[in-house]
């Protein structure tokens, strides 16, 4: 299998001179099995995915849950995925957002049907299901095509007129309108056990654009009939799910009845087979290459301030030691670092330093914390600097993936910037980041440099690119830049007033690049009493 773009692969299937086939999958392991079986593409079935969640095929699983599952499926495979996108999960605006999120996860296309939201499965009272207006559905197609960034991303329009009993003339009228609106292919659906309607439609359609079918009901039709009719793509739509259900029901009944696994053990997949499908061998190879490097990362955590805006909560402890959801802020941070393989942390204490008594940390005390600001605190731990380290504030709460992705991002100094300027969790006086490029919502590793950090939203003649969240990754040369900058800034009259953004701006002024890793929310810091409730909700 080549590594060409998945969207190009799907478009090639639609434009192939041969009749092509794709098979349903509903999670990462089933998608991997489909690829290993030899299929060139995957149908991410709405019925199958809703069933594996244990809910009905009536939009009871949210579109975000579907997209999350698609991410696992896409990561597990190298062949294209065509999503059964129901009605697009809403109106034209929902469709635009869906297409963007699918492209971010390297999903190659989406099929949407011309029914009303929320949908019901076509084989449940199909003739009672109202169809969307043609103009409305065409607008949805156009919205999806207008917002896609990859020209090869495919939108397939599924015509439900035959299912709903509206007849062939209406089916052809709708298909033509959808084709004119920009659909990359037409899926014609039928609930009959014979292919008569489908073959008649194919004759009338006469190859005006790629034609897709789902022969769930007319499965006994020889595939040669589809070839002769000029069908381009056949979707086997739910057979992975259905076959697994039969196997699981049989095994569970036997185990329950016999109170033993002896009779089924030799007839089910081995644990090693599961490991193979999960890519365990690749992980073992990656551990040999990367794990030692990850374990060498250390952290420097600034925890010297009281956090006076928290009032009586910090009377006898610094902000880092207040309780959030049963754990201290600092305790949660250390726990998250350890999960990422960062086991050595230096905590710079100041106010009520004795109250910082967490196990497994090295404590460095800034005795003069009241006389200076963040850089004066940072130099207290300069002897603890490492050639691979994180520098971060102690009041941060964030989802695990943010730290994981930061560790994997290249750059001598990399800072994390939240591009969601409308993030409601931002409080206090945020540090606005101005960057060389705005966040294009790529899933990972955009090539972006920091231009300036400022406490002012109007520091430059343009809108800020986002907020710096107070976390950076520093490698060997970056450490040298920081050491040199601290030595230079210590000689200035206002050194005791300087903060970490001043340090980073100075490094940029010296001509050294600082890379940016963009995120979109999923973090907060605790600056005031109003933040406490948000923090408690965040940790639930």
Image (tube, helix red, strand yellow):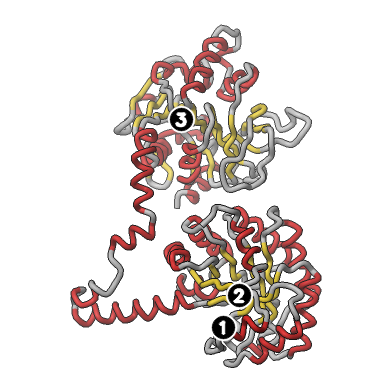
Asked whether the beta carbons under mark 2 and mark 1 sit within 8 Å of each other, the answer is yes
What residue sits 61% from the left and 18% below the top? 506
State whether residue 316 appears in this view.
no
Q: Dot 2 lies on which element?
A: loop
Q: 270 or 386: which is nearer to us?
A: 270
Q: Position of residue 442 (x, y in %)?
A: 62, 47
| Horizontal arrangement in the rendering, residue 44 relative to residue 142 (left or right) | left
| Horizontal arrangement in the rendering, residue 146 relative to residue 79 (left or right) | right
What residue sits 59% from the left and 59% below the top? 107
What residue sits 55% from the left and 32% below the top? 415
Label for residue 514? none
Label for residue 223? 1
Q: Earlier in the sequence, mark 2 or mark 1?
A: 2
Which residue has dot 3 on it? 390
Rate crowding at label 3 as few (under 14), some (14 to 19) or many (20 or more) other CA atoms within 10 Å. many
Which residue has dot 2 on it? 19
| Horizontal arrangement in the rendering, residue 408 relative to residue 437 (left or right) | left
């Amino acid at each position: 299998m080549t590594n060409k773009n998945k969207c190009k692969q799907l478009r090639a299937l639609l434009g192939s001179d041969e009749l092509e086939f794709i098979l349903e999958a509903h999670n990462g392991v089933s998608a991997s099995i489909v690829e290993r079986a030899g299929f060139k593409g995957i149908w991410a079935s709405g019925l199958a995915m809703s069933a594996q969640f244990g809910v009905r095929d009536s939009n009871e699983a949210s579109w975000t849950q579907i997209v999350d599952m698609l991410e696992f499926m896409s990561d597990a495979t190298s062949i294209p995925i065509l999503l059964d996108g129901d009605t697009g999960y809403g109106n034209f605006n929902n469709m635009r957002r869906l297409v963007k999120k699918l492209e971010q996860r390297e999903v190659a296309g989406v099929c949407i049907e011309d029914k009303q939201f929320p949908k019901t499965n076509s084989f449940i009272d199909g003739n009672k299901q109202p169809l969307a207006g043609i103009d409305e559905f065409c607008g949805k197609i156009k919205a999806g095509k207008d917002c896609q960034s990859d020209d090869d991303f495919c939108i397939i329009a599924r015509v439900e007129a035959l299912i709903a009993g509206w007849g062939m003339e209406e089916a052809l009228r709708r298909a033509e309108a959808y084709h004119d609106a920009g659909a990359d292919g037409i899926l014609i659906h039928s609930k009959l056990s014979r292919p008569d309607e489908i073959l008649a439609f194919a004759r009338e359609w006469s190859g005006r654009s790629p034609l897709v079918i789902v022969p769930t009901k007319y499965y006994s039709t020889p595939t040669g009939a589809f070839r002769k009719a000029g069908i381009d793509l056949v979707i086997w739509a739910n057979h992975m799910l259905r076959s697994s259900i039969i196997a699981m029901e049989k095994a569970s009944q036997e185990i329950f009845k016999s109170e033993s696994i002896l009779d089924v053990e030799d007839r089910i997949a081995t644990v090693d087979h599961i490991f193979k499908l999960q890519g365990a061998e690749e992980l073992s190879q990656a551990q040999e290459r990367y794990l030692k490097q990850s374990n060498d990362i250390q952290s420097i955590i600034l925890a010297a301030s009281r956090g006076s805006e928290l009032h009586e909560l910090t009377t006898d402890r610094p902000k880092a030691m207040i309780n959030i959801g049963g754990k201290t802020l600092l305790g949660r941070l250390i726990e998250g670092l350890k999960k990422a393989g960062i086991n050595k942390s230096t905590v710079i204490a100041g106010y009520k330093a004795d109250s910082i008594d967490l196990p497994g940390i090295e404590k460095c005390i800034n005795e003069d914390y009241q006389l200076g600001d963040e850089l004066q605190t940072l130099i207290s731990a300069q002897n603890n600097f490492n050639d691979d380290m994180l520098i971060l504030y102690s009041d941060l709460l964030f989802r695990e993936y943010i730290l994981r992705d930061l560790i994997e991002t290249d750059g001598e100094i990399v800072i994390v910037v939240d591009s969601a300027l409308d993030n409601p969790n931002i409080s206090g006086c945020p540090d606005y980041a101005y960057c060389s490029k705005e966040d294009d919502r790529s899933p990972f590793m955009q090539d972006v440099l920091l231009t300036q950090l400022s406490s002012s939203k109007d520091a430059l003649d343009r809108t800020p690119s986002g907020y710096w969240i107070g976390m950076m990754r520093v490698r060997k040369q970056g450490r040298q830049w920081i050491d040199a900058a601290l030595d230079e800034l210590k000689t200035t009259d206002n050194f005791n007033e300087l903060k970490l953004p001043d340090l980073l701006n100075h490094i940029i002024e010296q001509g050294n690049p600082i890379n940016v890793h963009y995120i979109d929310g999923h973090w907060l810091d605790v600056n005031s009493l109003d933040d406490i409730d948000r923090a408690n909700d965040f940790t639930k």
